[in-house]
Amino acid sequence: MVVNPNTTVSMTDTVAEAGRTVAAATTTVVGGTPTRGVSAVESNLDEVWGAVGVLEQVAAGEQAGVDGYVIACFGDTGLAAARELARGPVVGMSEAALYAAAAVAARFTIVTMPPRTREQSQRVLRHAGLEHRCTVRAIDEPVAAAASGSLHLLDEVASEARAALDEDRAEAIVLGCAGLTDLVTPLHELLGVPVIDGVLAGVTMVEGLLAMGLATSRRATFATPERLGPQ
Amino acid sequence: MVVNPNTTVSMTDTVAEAGRTVAAATTTVVGGTPTRGVSAVESNLDEVWGAVGVLEQVAAGEQAGVDGYVIACFGDTGLAAARELARGPVVGMSEAALYAAAAVAARFTIVTMPPRTREQSQRVLRHAGLEHRCTVRAIDEPVAAAASGSLHLLDEVASEARAALDEDRAEAIVLGCAGLTDLVTPLHELLGVPVIDGVLAGVTMVEGLLAMGLATSRRATFATPERLGPQ
Amino acid sequence: MVVNPNTTVSMTDTVAEAGRTVAAATTTVVGGTPTRGVSAVESNLDEVWGAVGVLEQVAAGEQAGVDGYVIACFGDTGLAAARELARGPVVGMSEAALYAAAAVAARFTIVTMPPRTREQSQRVLRHAGLEHRCTVRAIDEPVAAAASGSLHLLDEVASEARAALDEDRAEAIVLGCAGLTDLVTPLHELLGVPVIDGVLAGVTMVEGLLAMGLATSRRATFATPERLGPQ
Amino acid sequence: MVVNPNTTVSMTDTVAEAGRTVAAATTTVVGGTPTRGVSAVESNLDEVWGAVGVLEQVAAGEQAGVDGYVIACFGDTGLAAARELARGPVVGMSEAALYAAAAVAARFTIVTMPPRTREQSQRVLRHAGLEHRCTVRAIDEPVAAAASGSLHLLDEVASEARAALDEDRAEAIVLGCAGLTDLVTPLHELLGVPVIDGVLAGVTMVEGLLAMGLATSRRATFATPERLGPQ
Amino acid sequence: MVVNPNTTVSMTDTVAEAGRTVAAATTTVVGGTPTRGVSAVESNLDEVWGAVGVLEQVAAGEQAGVDGYVIACFGDTGLAAARELARGPVVGMSEAALYAAAAVAARFTIVTMPPRTREQSQRVLRHAGLEHRCTVRAIDEPVAAAASGSLHLLDEVASEARAALDEDRAEAIVLGCAGLTDLVTPLHELLGVPVIDGVLAGVTMVEGLLAMGLATSRRATFATPERLGPQ
Amino acid sequence: MVVNPNTTVSMTDTVAEAGRTVAAATTTVVGGTPTRGVSAVESNLDEVWGAVGVLEQVAAGEQAGVDGYVIACFGDTGLAAARELARGPVVGMSEAALYAAAAVAARFTIVTMPPRTREQSQRVLRHAGLEHRCTVRAIDEPVAAAASGSLHLLDEVASEARAALDEDRAEAIVLGCAGLTDLVTPLHELLGVPVIDGVLAGVTMVEGLLAMGLATSRRATFATPERLGPQ
């Protein structure tokens, strides 16, 4: 299940569809949209409500027998909690994107949006440990600008990506928002470097973990919790 | 306002009372208890519901004209979101404790509980930047064990703290749970080193920020968000 | 292709066979064994000759139309050079194992062999950025001890792994040698935590990169070199 | 006591007066000026003589029954030694400023003077652990330029601070010299972000530590030394 | 012995001659050129063949009774393996240059060539631990451009070095290629800051280690290996 | 000149004598003892007075035409200031020891005394950047115990050094006090790993810098200061 933390169904459809383009024939990709929450995840406040939405969908997925989850929000909101709730593996789109980028480039840059979310990318980067190989840039657009596709943002993203290649010595670009997934191909064609989308990377990473029979460790940090939600 | 992220009123009363012992005569310390949520914050799941509870209380505090907030939960759950919501400063008890410890000791150790929360302390430590001067230890007790005072935990905490002094070269002890506040004096008397409670440190830090006229920066990361909650 | 950097064919067979257990039905896993080199890779000297062997096999693979490569040596010897040589993605078993571990556990430990190779694991760890979440331990056995299977090493590895869980707060174990792949299941059954083998992780990671259409960036660090070998 | 490490009495008066504006009604702020030393602290040489001056004043303060100290020099010269000498807490203006900034902004920038002191700020930053959230800039003026107030430096400081907001993603400004304290209000009005002065932050931090009954740990690093000065 | 990892004899002659200018009267500096390998070391592929060449020469040196070695390649290719092979100390020109720079400047910059080798400098920097004090820049020239002296590159190197002084706050320049050794004096005269060449630094460092009677530790990492080369 | 920061002439004689054993025939090693100060440097207070003593001797050395200086105190007290004062290079015995150790071992341990000085070693280590390769241990003896030789401390130092080899994976030992210089040979014989004394390393490092014609950069951090001492 690709879990969209916000309530915008068109975004869920886009990311689930994108996920299907890389999934194995034997994998069924479903999207999850919270029934209640915020229409986009940008602020730290949004992240709290996004996490609540993620948990609602993971709980529903567990009922439905879902094998694994990708959290389709750069910032990986709700990831640690979702790992406690799900039987199978849960991967954040940001960490998956960073690991894929690290396998194809010595250095890379996240191009995210809007600027206020850069620290959320830094937080993910610090947890993943890749601060020494990755910088963070942003275009000045709200997440909502990508609600119905992002091809109209190509110029803006390309401009910031070019600056990354020239000034930050980036060798690949990580798209810092689930809504930008349809830029993977056009941006790659423009720049000639790998362009990585975290939803795609997340779907293949969950497939890989499942192939290896791996699920979240229950020792200490992600042990099954005493409480599953408000009493 | 000292915001308890869980719904256990006795804990709110304890931490608010503790806060009053260090507050200036001109400061009124009030406690905030979420009307709905979890009875203790231990797991990553609890942290999501704790953050929701913190936001509920900060929203109420803003209505009531509260000047500043201390989040009374080691792990500082909901801190970044609360900073977006509140007009005045918001301080996490963990970061406040770490800064106070850094001002009185070259190295120190957090003694938290239960063991599953150690990574939450590491996360705060990494954000505060003090990993090179601080280690994390835990006693094997649930947070609920401190719901009505923690004097019965003195031996367990002291034993772990002594190990910190001997093996980790700690020179001060940070209590890693709001519920341990009544151990400050007995533990200090036992060990002879500074013992720091984050609620106390948080209250004095908020007072200090208010005296300087400082509030959260509205530039980028904590700018006033478009949405204040679920629509 | 799973590239064994040493000349021991039984090891190549073991790792290729292991790779097949996780590969998709549409993936053909072939093993590559250098025709000349060292029988095991333990020392820094061995790593130089292992890198030469890796390059020999990748050059052969390019002739044969191989899509992607896993370097089956903890230490990822020859990885950067192989990336310059291959059209498709090249993944080191160590980095793949670390990323998989980071997706299922907050902290983890590499159990490698022999002790002299610990610094090689540290080097990989530093490059991957996961030093803050991973420790390195070793059993005192030469790599050759695992040339024909490693089930007889289970007790030794389990003993070190248990020390990792208890003393290093590890929540998962990464096997630090391609030769230990047949310990994945028995060790997992003994310890109850995720046990990760880098060859398996590498095979699924290469599959994922290929599904996304990603190959090594040709910008700067891994640009096609002027010289492909000695003149 | 606010300890000025240099012999310029007008600077002591300015910082003590500034300290009084944030101190509680029950706090008496006194200034301390070394009887012998250097007229400003800029170079590494100055720092040695500044440390000697700090110790002279702390020794005098101990005679006079002073409760706590703020070292009013960016670079916190003499801080570790003063902690050994004083019964009560001793806070450096730099560390206090950094902690206050960390509580109101995700990222911030020190604007210091002159350029040669930037490494002294880096040293403090590294010890405080906040290098990942703070950059250092400098205006090209000697400390002496601020001996009788710094309002004439507003344009220069504002220009560098604006560059910090734009290029370093700073969200708050830390004034990197005790002599700049009268820029707090005008700079805040110009830029609209928090502007933090370390003397103010230090005074409130010492008040907080005293309210909690905390003093420097006597275990190991700051144990009472055998010798209090030259024999 | 100054070991040139490439097969270009004119480069060996240049670096050996340079080494003699700083060596003590009692030291005999000889150059070592691999009989087979690559004509320059730029790519990661070149580094593998460079390492093979270094080992060939160190093996020859051991036969000839050489006391210590400098690897004359920025990137220190083959260094760890050479330490296992040689009885006496082996120093990489990069690490030697960085330590010398750290002793004469607070911050410094490596100016290397070509741009693709910057990550090799970063790798050395990370191992040496000096990333917080050093940046890496490159001129866009192949190593071969310096095969017969580098005076014609002075303008290009000086331009990048000036940018380092102005934008990176560098206080000294490290020449990032053995071929640039004849720029030490003219660049120092142009810029007025220390200019450090790693071959010179390496020769004096080996002399120093020999004077102290120090050789590579045989404990763990660099223990005498079981195999000295391909079987 | 080997500058002893304390007033104990027997220590100066010991370290100068030790320096002579590694110096080139063309080098004259002189010792410098402050005329006023403290008899040993252990506490942070001692370090201030030690720095004053170092400056006194460097000033005298400049009058006498000394070419370069080694500060013979682990902790490198007064180093930055001395660099501003001296025409030629100034090397701290700690940094010199760490760089020499890094050239002969992958990991190493400082054995210092007394325990209160461990943070001073950590400070040097952080500045040198070698925290990832070096640990710090201490024997429980005052510096004064080594005032007339340290052979009677061999057992204590050896015991801590053995613990470093076994528990910290050290491969070499750095003696963390100038007074321990006569343990170099007996400890090496006992343990079979490199044993490094900073005074010896410092003397050879200054010789190397002088051979290269290098002196402290005058750009920014160590520019010639306006004031050379108290007015």
Image (spheres, coloured by chain):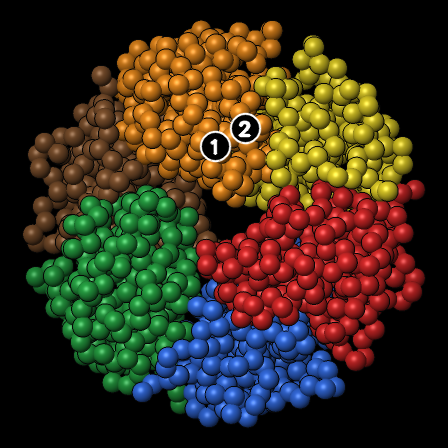
Chain colours: A brown, B orange, C green, D yellow, E blue, F red
The residue located at (49%, 42%) in the rendering is B167
Please state the horizontal and vertical placement of residue C194, each as a whole percent of the image: 22, 49
Q: Residues within 10 Å of mark 2 (few under 14, many from 20)?
A: some
**E189, C92: nearer the viewer:** C92
Q: Is residue F198 left or right of residue A115?
A: right
The image quadrant where one finds the N terminus of chain D is top right
Q: Is residue F198 left or right of residue A156?
A: right
Residue named by callout 1: B161
Residue named by callout 2: B191
Residues tagged by mark 1 and mark 2 found on one chain of the structure: yes
Q: How many marks?
A: 2
The residue located at (84%, 57%) in the rendering is F9
Look at label 2 and name its amino acid. Leu
Mark 1–mark 2 distance (CA, rounded to whole Å): 8 Å
Please state the horizontal and vertical placement of residue B165, each as a whole percent of the image: 52, 37
- Which SS class for mark 2? helix
Please state the horizontal and vertical placement of residue E133, each as a whole percent of the image: 60, 56
Look at label 1 and name its amino acid. Ala
The answer to whether residue C145 of the structure is visible from this angle is yes
The residue located at (37%, 46%) in the rendering is C167
Please state the horizontal and vertical placement of residue A200, each as a whole percent of the image: 23, 50
Dot label at residue B49: none
- Which SS class for mark 1? helix
**B121, C224: nearer the viewer:** B121
Look at the picture and state if E50 lies above or below E118.
below
